Amino acid sequence: MAEPLPPTRSRIPGSGLAKGLAVTLRTMTKKTVTAQYPDAQPELPPRTRGVIGLFEENCTVCMLCARECPDWCIYIDSHKETVPPAAPGGRERSRNVLDRFAIDFSLCMYCGICIEVCPFDALFWSPEFEYAETDIHELTHERDKLREWMWTVPAPPALDPAAEEPKEIAAARKTADKLAAEQAARAEAAEAEAAERKAAQTEAGAAQGDPAQADPAQADPAQGGQAAAPGEPTAPPGHPTAPPGRPEPPAAPPSGPQEGQS
């Protein structure tokens, strides 16, 4: 046997109208806040969809954005160029060169599909929205204009301190560390080779009895002059000596009688 329905509450006629008027009365007593645009710029969230910027260096003309656009408002033109081989005996390659990249914002519905499907991060959202025109044809922004919008793209938010490092930064840091290690290894090898060469020259000079190679300080006039021969008197300190490379003056002959003369 079905249970009886609970009794319905009787509604007072005009209760809904009274509630609506109560909201109106509460709002009328509050102070109105009007945004004084354009004198005061609005504070937009960082992910505002204002206009699309193009980072041309990342574009590979893959045409994914143009194919996925539901409004067909992206126009791309390109041509192929032949790239010479990087190494002798290599094979030539061909690459696409971007000639035109334009977006018709009079057709764009700001869905963001083109930015999401771009595999090389060539398209970005900018919060700028003040680009109204009096002529609808001027709403088609070519690649130069799209490149200017890139300067208004906000920086990406900082990662969480516990988050993993992005793969791009990790790969770049790994490559930089590898190059730095190779350069340090080459520098150490060059220093070791120079030290071994100097030691070999010193040992060869000592074996041959050459003081210039055994002790370079003895052969340097600025560090002590010429080495004196064994048994030869040396000049006292402070006594001027003949400059190197200049012969000593001959000794004066004795004035007395010599043997063998009558």
Image (cartoon, rainbow, N blue to C red):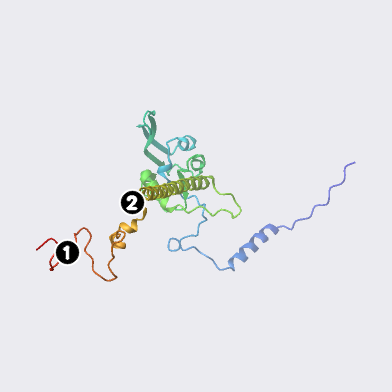
Indicate the quadrant where residue 10 lies: bottom right
Please tell me whether residue 179 is drawn above or below residue 216 in the rendered image.
above
Q: Position of residue 259 (x, y in %)?
A: 14, 62
Q: Residue furthest front?
A: 262
The first of marks 1 and 2 along the sequence is: 2
Residue positioned 53% across, 47% down in the render = 170
In front of the other: 159 or 188: 188
Crowding at label 2, few (<14), some or many (≥20) Cα neighbours within 10 Å?
A: some
- The N terminus sits in image quarter: top right
Looking at the rendered structure, the kind of residue marked 2 is: Asp
In the figure, 52 relative to 158: above or below? above
Query: Residue 208 placed where, x, y %?
Result: 35, 48
Q: Position of residue 128 (x, y in %)?
A: 44, 53
In-front residue for pair 165/129? 165
Q: In the rendered picture of this protein, how many numbered marks are placed on residues?
A: 2
Give the residue at x 88% y 42%: 2
Query: Callout 1: few (<14), some (14-19), or many (20+) C-alpha neighbours within 10 Å?
Result: few
Q: Which residue is mark 1?
A: 251
Q: Quadrant of the C terminus?
A: bottom left
Where is mark 2, residue-wise? 210
Residue placed farthest to the left in the image?
262
